[in-house]
Amino acid sequence: MIQKLFKFFKNLVDNFMGFFSNDLGIDLGTATTLVFVKGEGVVLLEPSVVAIEKSANRVVAVGEDAKKMIGRTPESIVAIRPMKDGVISDPEVTEQMLKYFIRKAQPKKFFRRPVVVIAIPPGITEVEKRAVIDSAEHAGARAVILIEQPKAAAIGVGLPVQEPGGNMIIDIGGGTTDFAVISLGGIVYAKSIKVAGDEMDMAIMEYLRKTYNLMIGERTSEEIKIRIGSAYPLDEELSMDVRGRDLIAGLPKTISITSVEVREALADTVQAIVDASKSTLEHTPPELAADLIDRGIVMAGGGSLLRGLDRRIAEETGLPVHVAEDPTTAVVMGTGETLNMPPAMRRRLMSHSKLDF
C-alpha cells in the first residue's frame, strides 16, 4: 500500500514537473540528426558533423557549419562524423554534438532536464546502446529511452503497429538501411544492412574515378545523387555538369554525366537493398506476409527519395510500395509520438531505457 502511494505521488510530481521541461525525440543518424521537441514538433535538422581543432582538441563547429568545412579545412582543423553505420564511433565527439543540438533545441532554461527518446538501429549490441545512453546523459538528458529506428519510422508514418497485423517498413538512412515487420507493438523480424545513402555517394565517386579519372568530394557526389540519381529508367533521362580534379593532369576539370550513368554507378547498392527487402519477406510468418499483400511496404528515410526505388522494389517483390509523405522526418516524428504515449504502451515499444521515474 505504501509503495503504491509513493508511486502515485511520484508520478504526480513527475507529471507536474513535466510542464517545466521540454522532452525531446532524437533521430541520431549517421548523416543527419533531427530533434523533436514535445509540444513544438521538429525544430532541428542538421548534418551529424563536428569540426575539431586538432591541436587543442576543441570543437569549432557543429552541424551545418561543420559540414560546409568538409574537404575545405586547413590541416589544423578536421571535420568528422562521430556516427558510423548508425552507431557511435567517437563517444566524446558525439557527446559534444548531442550537447550542442539539445541546447539549440531548448534555447530557454527549464527547471528540469529533458526525457530523451533516441532512435537506434535494430540489432546493435548492449555496449553500443550503453554508449548512446551515456552520451545523451552527459549531454543533459535526465532519462533516456531507446527505440529501434524502423519501429519509430513505422509510428512516425502512422502505421497501426499496435494492431495484430503485418506492417513492413524500410528505413534508408545515411549509414544503414533497416527492414522490419512489426505487429502488436513488437518487431517480428528485422534486418539491417550497411548499405544506404553514404554507400550510394561512395559508389558515384568511385564510378567517376574509374570512368573519367575525376576525383570529386562527398558533397558533390550527394548533389549528383539528388539531382539525377535513379534506381529505375526514367521517362526522360537527366544530365548535369560535374566539376572535380583530373587525377592524371591534377587540374580542375568539368564533365557532363547522365542519369543512365548514375543508375549504373548505383546498381550494386540498389540491388543490395532490393535483395534485403526480399530476404525480409522470406523470413516473415505466412499470416503476416498475407497482410502485406493489401497493406504493402512503406519506405522512409532520405534514401527512399531516390527516383524509382519504390517502383524497383515493388516490381521485384510483387507488393505495393509507398514512400512516406515526409520520409526524412518519419523516424524523429515516431520518437515524438512515443513521448506522447501512455507509460505502459511506451514500455512495450522500448528497446531499452534508463529512467529515473
Image (tube, rainbow, N blue to C red):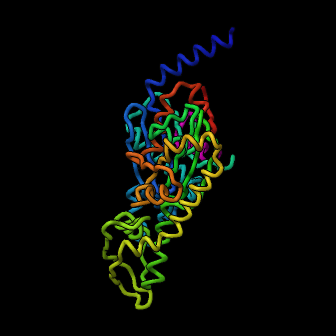
Which residue is found at the position 39% from the left and 31% from the top?
A: 39
Q: Nearer the viewer, residue 181 or 212?
A: 181
- The residue range painted magenta reads 129-144
Tell me residue 142's x, y (percent). 55, 34
Tell me residue 276's x, y (percent). 59, 57
Q: Is residue 22 above or below residue 29?
A: above
The verdict on residue 318 being magenta is: no
Confirm whether residue 335 shows in the render. no
Q: Nearer the viewer, residue 219 or 73?
A: 219
Q: Is residue 23 above or below residue 64?
A: above
Q: Residue furthest top?
A: 1
**Is 47 displayed left or right of 287 in the figure?**
left
Tag count in the figure? 0
Which residue is found at the position 47% from the left and 69% from the top?
A: 266
Q: Nearer the viewer, residue 274 or 82?
A: 274
Tell me residue 351's x, y (percent). 62, 39
- Quadrant of the frame with the C terminus: top right
The verdict on residue 130 being magenta is: yes
Tell me residue 178's x, y (percent). 56, 52
The image quarter containing residue 130 is: top right
Which residue is found at the position 58% from the left and 37% from the top?
A: 145
Q: Nearer the viewer, residue 52 or 357?
A: 357
Q: Main secondary structure of the magenta part?
A: helix
- Quadrant of the frame with the N terminus: top right
